[in-house]
Image (tube, grey):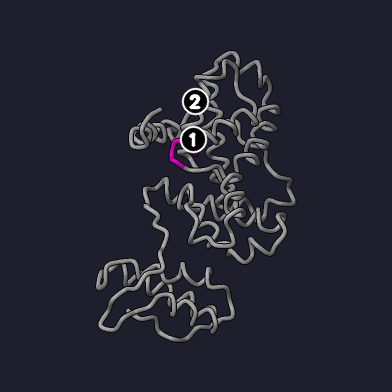
Amino acid sequence: MKEPQAVQNLLKPLENKLATPSTTYTTQTGEQGAGHRESGPTAAEQQTRVLVNMLFARFKAIYTHKFASAYSTTDEVKLAKREWAIALKGFQEPLLAYAVERTKEVHPWPPTIADFLKLINTAYKAYGLADPRSAYLEACACRSDPLMYKWSHPSVFFAGSEVGWYKIKSEEERVSWPLFEAAYVKVVDRVIAGERLVIPKVTMIENKQTLNVTELVRHISSQLDMPEEQVLPLLYYTQKTQGSGIRLRYREISEKKLLDMGYKEKLPE
């Protein structure tokens, strides 16, 4: 088992490999009907199409005649790419690049979508992350007291906070799961980009006056009539060095979010 840093060093060049344009296989993903052409694909959908095209170019180079046997006609390729684009929506390039390298090791023939999704889950592990479904189940199990739980990775806490712990507790899975999955994918992108996530702690932060974060959380919670666990992440700035630029930026962001929620008081520095 490689150490996390060694794994990340391995993954970086793989990102470039997947992103290298290829002229060996240019059949596009299946287009929508003519009635949908006016609006066109969203940026996320277009990015997924680009990644799927790159993925198929890699598969063609890796599997040569075996790939041609699996996808013998242009129509078959279009239909296959459409299904792959649906299945891989939301996955980012580093995870796909890692899965491609693992595919070469374990699959003598081009993988099915199910095979490839299993390998993507191993890519999450390479970054020290849980796969989205496991992360969701962890968030559900620890939703009552998220600040007291020792999370498998801070990404789970931040995704749960983005959705709202009250919503995770009160909504049915058909509502909360898609919201959590979307939030978690965004947090994973931040982790892959190198951001270090730190779960905030309820502590006393000294200023010219003593700032009691616990009391501030309760005050804002009562003013907005919302659960305290949804307020606490907005006070993350208090964990940064007083007077630093990053603390100021986080505070400004929190003030704007709270203002949008209806809280008009200034946050203490």
Which residue was labeled with disc 2? 102
Tell which circle, 1 or 2, labels the residue nearer the N-terminal end: 2
Residue 125 in percent (x, y) is at: 48, 37
Q: Are marks 1 and 2 in contact (CB under 8 Å)?
A: yes
Q: Amino acid at mark 1?
A: Ala
Which residue was labeled with disc 1? 123
Q: Quadrant of residue 236?
A: bottom left
The magenta region covers 124-128
Vertical placement of residue 146 versus 56, above or below: below
Q: Residue at x 49, y 35 (%)?
A: 123
Main SS type for the magenta part?
A: helix
In the rendered image, residue 204 lying in the magenta stretch gets the answer: no
Q: Nearer the viewer, residue 128 or 120?
A: 128
Q: Nearer the viewer, residue 252 or 37?
A: 252
- In the picture, which quadrant includes the C terminus? bottom left
Question: How busy is the neighbourhood of tag 1: few (under 14 within 10 Å), some, or many (20 plus)?
Answer: many
Q: Residue at x 53, y 56 (%)?
A: 159
- In the picture, which quadrant includes the N terminus? top left
Q: Residue at x 48, y 61 (%)?
A: 147
Vertical placement of residue 175 versus 70, above or below: below
Vertical placement of residue 64 versus 48, above or below: above
